[in-house]
Image (cartoon, rainbow, N blue to C red):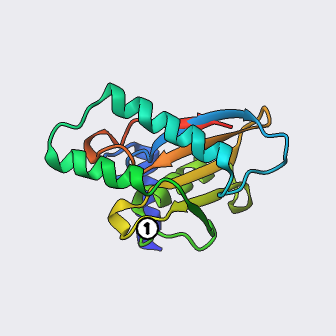
Amino acid sequence: MRRLLCLVICGLLGCGLCREAGAAVYLGNFAGGRPTCDNRQIIAKVREKIAAYMAEHPASGVVESRRQKLLLKNLHDFTAVSPVDFTSKDDLLTANRLIMLKINEGYTDTDFLVCKSSGDGKKYNIYLLIYPLDNGDYNIEIINFLPPEKSGEQFSVIY
């Protein structure tokens, strides 16, 4: 409870401990209803967004190059994760973003779809945080792709 209160206060005050989650993709209206984690259109848009980012921002060293290759390798399959049970132990940036959207935008747990990549090990997992926008589109935030020093930037696509 104390940690949650700290995260809420950090979010409200804008302190550096609670960074923005990362990236998002805009895809437009989804005719088939609510999107799912195994939707090939979503995965293609996410891969396209990441490839464009990587082309604009080449890796600065061997470690970052290896990190990008591992992340891209694991972007073929996503599984759903319950947003209700999601905590900072699962992934800090995703948990922070869930809390910020609930507090600042009024979303509830039922509005979110959280998808986790099939990465081996916590360090290489990318999360997709999918939630509806007012116009009927879905925002897809790509979390844990950007390097830590750039994780305050918004990285997303609209679906």
Residue in view at x 54 percent, y 69 percent: 86
Residue in view at x 43 percent, y 67 percent: 88
Q: Please indicate, yes or no, whether residue 32 appears anywhere in the rendered image.
A: yes
Q: Where residue 112 sits: x, y (%)?
A: 67, 56
Q: Is residue 59 above or below residue 69?
A: above
Q: Nearer the viewer, residue 13 or 154?
A: 154
**Which residue is disc 1 drawn over?**
88
**Is 112 left or right of 15, judged from the image as shown?**
right
**Is 107 left or right of 95, judged from the image as shown?**
right
Instruction: Choose top left, top right, bottom left or bottom right for residue 26.
Output: top right
Residue in view at x 38 percent, y 47 percent: 19
Q: Nearer the viewer, residue 124 or 86?
A: 124
Quarter containing the C terminus: top right
**Is 148 left or right of 103, judged from the image as shown?**
left
Q: Where residue 79 sits: x, y (%)?
A: 59, 65
Q: Residues within 10 Å of mark 1 (few under 14, many from 20)?
A: few
Q: Please indicate, yes or no, whether residue 105 appears anywhere in the rendered image.
A: no
Residue in view at x 84 percent, y 48 percent: 33
Q: Where residue 50 sits: x, y (%)?
A: 44, 38
Q: Nearer the viewer, residue 25 or 13?
A: 25
Amino acid bearing label 1 = Ser
